Amino acid sequence: MTSTGTLWGVGLGPGDPELITVKAARLIGEADVIAYHCARHGRSIARSVAEPYLRGDQHEERLMYPVTTETTDHPGGYEGAIAEFYEHAAKRLAEHLDAGRDVVLLCEGDPFFYGSYMYMHERLCERYRAVAVPGVTSISAASAALGRPLAQRDEVLTVLPGTLPTPELAMRLADADAAAVMKLGRTFGSVRTALAEAGKLDEAYYIERATWHEQAGPGATGRGVQRLEPLADVDPDTVPYFSLALLPSPAYAARTAASAPAEPSDAPPGGEVVVVGLGPAGPEWLTPEAGAALADAEHLVGYGPYLARVPQRQGQQRHSSGNRVEADRACQALELARDGARVAVVSSGDPGVFAMATAVLEQAEQPRFADVSVRVLPGVTAAQAAASRVGAPLGHDYCVLSLSDRLKPWEIIERRLDAVGAADLAVAFYNPASRSRTTQLTAARDVLLRHRAPDTPVVVARDIGGAEESVTVTTLGELDPATVDMRCLLIVGSSRTRAVERDGTTTVWTPRTYQEDRT
């Protein structure tokens, strides 16, 4: 009984036959069947790269695409035509595998990196042994040809397809450290626009046919030659599919620029940092003043999810970071402003309430930032937004308190809770719970129960203004801390706060008059 053959998805690298791996060369030479994709003209770039390693007596399977960029009259359109082609191609390869013949399917670059091999793999890997042999990617080749590192140290490399919508591409490029945009060709105009809107067009390079060195002349196959130039200078009509846009390591670029002779600058000695409150959710919560500051900024700095809420504007650069590096984020904004830039630091809610205003002002006290102006623009707070959904639970004196003990010890929080309870203040709890903090809310409830009746109204507000918004009115005695997480804000009423059923909903409000019970 003949055993089935093996399907090898062999990465050929970016185009230079000398960049094929030793393993790939050996498999190409040993295979019974060599398969490769091609367009209707019949020529195959993959085969031309692998040709030095072919034996000459192997069976070749030419998998000819029914369409590439042209239109089709297939009932299922382009996607239907391509899906049908892959099914037919898989059956052709399966016939060889069933006969016990090993099949090498040639793939430019790496088989699993935007490679055509993956479509055969997913159709055949459950019936036959299917192995992908990695190859040098076009991104690595482009970086080497350019002579600039892709990324270093803590930089993040982002790989994007040029087929993304321009606004999304611009947003992702603005947030990226280093980036590569694949699949240019017809998408070049959109990619160029996205780079301009992200403020990174002048940093981008265009690389075409990296490592291809064939010169025109007798015997040339028309594969072309390598081309490198600043992307801003490229004529869109000259861009083929085998090209990419590259934003190499910004740290390397900064060091290179620092070593160059300084040129006279008209920039002012100190710029400005504006700390902007975005409100709790979408653009409807943003004040006109904050919106104008965001539109005027040259740089936006902030926590990634908050930056994503700000529409991308042409020429702006974005600098996103994690949620626990407030000091680093503040210094970055101040450094940019010290060089004369207009910088907006974004915060959710109000920047002065457990947010970025304090972090920026603290770092601004360093002598090196003495010439940098800092302004703070208010935003709608989460407490205000949550209160508005149920009425006016904060209608009288109230306290705002964070239950996070990351920046202050729990003993301080508990002492303040006890004082709030004794003073009979309504209280809005920020940061009530997280995956690592599961006991604080229970302890806070118990402290308040020393001073409040169990039927004191409690508002549990989640994701106010967002897609998962929910508001629950319960009582202090019935509050279940297990239902609360970091996306919630809690409001606990005072002894005077009332919860009233009105039109099928619960309205919560605290009277503005206060008459202490002296009996």
Image (cartoon, rainbow, N blue to C red):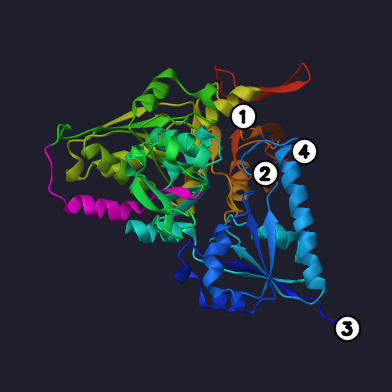
Q: Which residue is mark 4?
A: 74
Q: Quadrant of the N terminus?
A: bottom right
Question: Given the image, on which type of amino acid does mark 2 rest?
Answer: Val
Mark earlier in primary sequence (3, 4)? 3
Q: Is residue 430 above or below residue 158?
A: above
Q: Which residue is mark 3?
A: 1
Tag 3 secondary structure: loop
- How many neighbours does mark 3 have within 10 angstroms: few (below 14), some (14-19), or many (20 or more)? few
Question: Given the image, on which type of amino acid does mark 3 rest?
Answer: Met
Q: Are marks 4 and 1 in contact (CB under 8 Å)?
A: no
Mark earlier in primary sequence (4, 1)? 4
Residue 445 within the segment the image draws in magenta: no
- How many neighbours does mark 1 have within 10 angstroms: few (below 14), some (14-19), or many (20 or more)? some
In this rendering, the label closer to the viewer, 3 or 2: 2
- For residue 98, the mark is none
- For residue 495, the mark is 1
Question: Given the image, on which type of amino acid does mark 1 rest?
Answer: Ser
How many angstroms separate mark 3 from mark 4 (CA)? 41 Å
Mark earlier in primary sequence (3, 2)? 3
In this rendering, the label closer to the viewer, 1 or 2: 2
Mark earlier in primary sequence (1, 2)? 2
Q: Are marks 4 and 2 in contact (CB under 8 Å)?
A: yes
Does the image show residue 4?
yes
How many angstroms separate mark 3 from mark 1 (CA)? 86 Å
Q: Are marks 3 and 1 in contact (CB under 8 Å)?
A: no
Question: Given the image, on which type of amino acid does mark 4 rest?
Answer: His
Q: Which percent across, then down, holds residue 207?
A: 40, 50
